[in-house]
Image: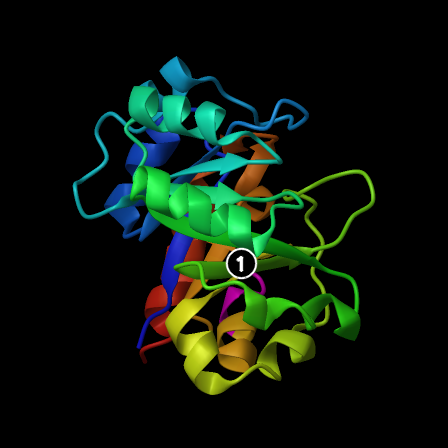
């Protein structure tokens, strides 16, 4: 079975359209102010404007308030919220109850201890990304995938999104080693932060299609 692919850090509608046409399961835009890929609500709405109904439109936030996320979701037409900060399990539940949107909680992995709190999160999906002291996501760096591969198979196949340094050169290996529900790609197909390279995007999805062969 082909893995689902989330293309994140989008800043241009043309890239979002190309990703959706190639078969992306989800499209992501970053709202965190400190990100070089940061977009505003109006920009995100334009980026997602032509996304097919079946493609998830994800807004990525870092320690944002419920009000901020709700407003951005309404203005941008988001169908999912990715919480990429120190949000607690209780806060994730509060956001889910208030918005009714799909909730993705991101955890940054630096070692085995990073996964000790996984079970407390009952969000729709859990995303594992590489820990970096100065950045959240889009680092271009991978973590030790054996840590994710050690999680229960039912959890990996049902709720886990694997992120961190993924691109055309390692997407197949990541899928085979971890067997996650989905894979999240951002900097691995960029020519500059937020600018997706068409050739790299095409190579990525060619690799994904070949996984069925």
Front in this rendered view, residue 97 or 113: 97
Front in this rendered view, residue 203 or 83: 83
Counting every numbered tag in the picture gives: 1
Instruction: Say above or below: 69 vs 134.
Output: above
Q: Main secondary structure of the magenta part?
A: loop
Magenta stretch? 168-172
Residue at image coords 33%, 38%: 99
**Position of the N terminus by quadrant:** bottom left
- In the picture as drawn, the residue positioned furthest to the right comes out as 133
Residue at image coords 61%, 30%: 193
**Position of the C terminus by quadrant:** bottom left
The quadrant where residue 191 appears: top right
The question of residue 170 being in magenta is answered with yes
Instruction: Say above or below: 142 vs 148.
Output: above
Look at the image and tell me whether residue 11 can be seen: no
Can you identify the residue that label 1 sits on? 127
> Residue 97: where, in percent of width, then height?
35, 46
Residue at image coords 50%, 80%: 176
- In the picture as drawn, the residue positioned furthest to the top comes out as 42
Look at the image and tell me whether residue 173 can be seen: yes
> Residue 20: where, in percent of width, then height?
28, 43
Is 177 placed left or right of 18 in the picture? right
At mark 1, the secondary structure is strand
> Residue 64: where, in percent of width, then height?
57, 31
- Circle 1 crowding by C-alpha within 10 Å: few under 14, some 14–19, many from 20: many
> Residue 53: where, in percent of width, then height?
16, 41
Front in this rendered view, residue 171 or 73: 73
The question of residue 182 being in magenta is answered with no
Instruction: Say above or below: 41 vs 102.
Output: above
């Amino acid at each position: 079975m082909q893995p689902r692919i989330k293309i994140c850090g989008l800043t241009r509608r043309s890239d979002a359209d190309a990703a959706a046409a190639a078969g992306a399961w989800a499209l992501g835009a970053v709202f965190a102010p400190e990100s070089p890929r940061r977009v505003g609500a109006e920009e995100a709405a334009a980026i997602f404007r032509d996304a097919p109904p079946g493609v998830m439109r994800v807004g990525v936030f870092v320690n944002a308030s419920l009000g901020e996320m709700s407003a951005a979701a309404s203005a941008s037409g988001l169908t999912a919220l990715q919480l990429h900060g120190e949000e607690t399990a209780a806060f994730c539940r509060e956001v889910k109850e208030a918005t009714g949107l799909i909730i993705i909680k991101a955890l940054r992995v630096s070692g085995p201890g990073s996964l000790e709190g996984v079970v407390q999160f009952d969000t729709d999906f859990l995303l594992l990304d590489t820990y970096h002291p100065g950045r959240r996501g889009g680092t271009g760096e991978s973590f030790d995938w054996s840590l994710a591969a050690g999680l229960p198979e039912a959890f990996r196949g049902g709720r886990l999104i694997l992120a961190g340094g993924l691109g055309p050169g390692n997407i197949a290996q990541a899928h085979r080693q971890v067997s996650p529900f989905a894979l999240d790609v951002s900097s691995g197909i960029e020519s500059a932060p937020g600018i997706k390279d068409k050739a790299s995007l095409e190579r990525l999805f060619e690799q994904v299609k070949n996984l069925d062969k």
